[in-house]
């Protein structure tokens, strides 16, 4: 089912929201679990990432989206529902399970969609999970060409950065100070991918 949906989305996106990818080869050697950490400027972001990466990605999404048929569709795609205001307690354990099973977890580092296309203040979820699981973090930047927001029939560029491994993050005790420093480091790597 996932493969069929992925193929269908690939055809639709390439026709209506054309895109190109740079750096896809950087994740081919990652056979175990890792965190795919991206900026967030559109409701299409998760779909773009699903299409360009063959392995299944589990994304975090707000609970309100999981209603009726659309909710079933999201669960088929591997989306994880999170309750607003209770995200930390409801998601960390499930995310750890996914990563320890060798799967990919998709996180939008800003925690919400930017309505202007500008970068927002990053959240520490990716840093917390990197500390707990010791998996690599792969920075990704989604950038519409010539515009700040994704538009129909206008090309979007997706840049995949070099994986950042646990030993490079210098997370020793998981203190608030360490996690904030690591969060900012990941965000800077995402920003540097924007052209």
Image (tube, rainbow, N blue to C red):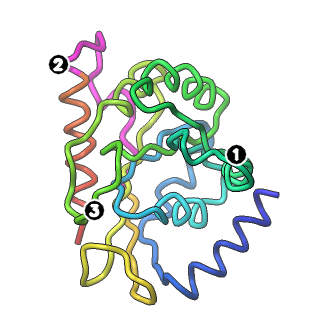
What residue lies at 24% left-to-right and 45% top-to-bottom? 187
Location of the N terminus (image quadrant): bottom right
Q: Is residue 147 above or below residue 163?
A: below
Of the numbered discs 2 and 3, the one sitting upstream in the chain is 3
Location of residue 103 in the rendering, given as x and y in whole percent from the top left corner: 63, 38
Seen from the viewer's position, the closer of residues 151 and 22 is 151
Image quadrant assignment for residue 99 = top right
What residue lies at 30% left-to-right and 45% top-to-bottom? 110
SS state under label 1: helix
**Can you name the residue that lies furthest to the right here?**
1
Label drawn at residue 134 = none
Seen from the viewer's position, the closer of residues 32 and 111 is 111
Is 103 covered by the magenta stretch?
no
Q: Give the range drawn in magenta.
A: 161-178
Label drawn at residue 177 = 2
User: Is the stretch drawn in magenta largely helix, strand or loop?
Assistant: loop
Which residue in the protein does label 1 denote? Answer: 75
Which residue in the protein does label 3 denote? Answer: 115
Q: How crowded is mark 3: few (under 14 residues within 10 Å), some or many (20 or more)?
A: few
Q: Residues within 10 Å of mark 1 (few under 14, many from 20)?
A: some
Label 2 to label 1: alpha-carbon separation: 35 Å
SS state under label 2: helix
Location of residue 153 in the rendering, given as x and y in whole percent from the top left corner: 45, 89
Nearer the viewer's eye, disc 2 or disc 3?
3
What residue lies at 28% left-to-right and 57% top-to-bottom? 114
Of the numbered discs 2 and 1, the one sitting upstream in the chain is 1
Q: In this view, does 48 lie above or below 104?
A: below
Please indicate whether residue 189 sits to the left or right of residue 66 in the image: left
Of the numbered discs 3 and 1, the one sitting upstream in the chain is 1
């Amino acid at each position: 089912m996932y493969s069929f949906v992925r193929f269908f989305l690939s055809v639709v996106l390439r026709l209506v929201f054309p895109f190109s990818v740079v750096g896809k080869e950087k994740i081919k050697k990652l056979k175990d679990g890792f965190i795919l950490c991206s900026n967030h400027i559109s409701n299409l972001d998760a779909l773009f990432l699903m299409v360009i990466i063959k392995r299944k990605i589990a994304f975090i999404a707000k609970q309100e989206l999981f209603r009726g048929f659309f909710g079933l569709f999201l669960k088929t795609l591997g989306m994880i529902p999170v309750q607003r205001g209770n995200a930390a307690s409801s998601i960390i354990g499930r995310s750890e399970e996914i990563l320890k099973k060798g799967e990919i977890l998709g996180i939008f580092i800003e925690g919400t969609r930017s309505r202007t296309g500008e970068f927002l203040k990053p959240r520490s979820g990716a840093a917390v999970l990197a500390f707990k699981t010791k998996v690599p973090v792969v920075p990704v930047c989604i950038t519409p060409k010539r515009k700040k927001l994704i538009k129909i029939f206008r090309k979007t560029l997706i840049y995949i950065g070099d994986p950042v491994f646990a030993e490079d993050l210098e997370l020793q005790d998981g203190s608030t100070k360490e996690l904030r420093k690591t969060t900012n480091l990941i965000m800077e790597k995402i920003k540097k991918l924007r052209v």
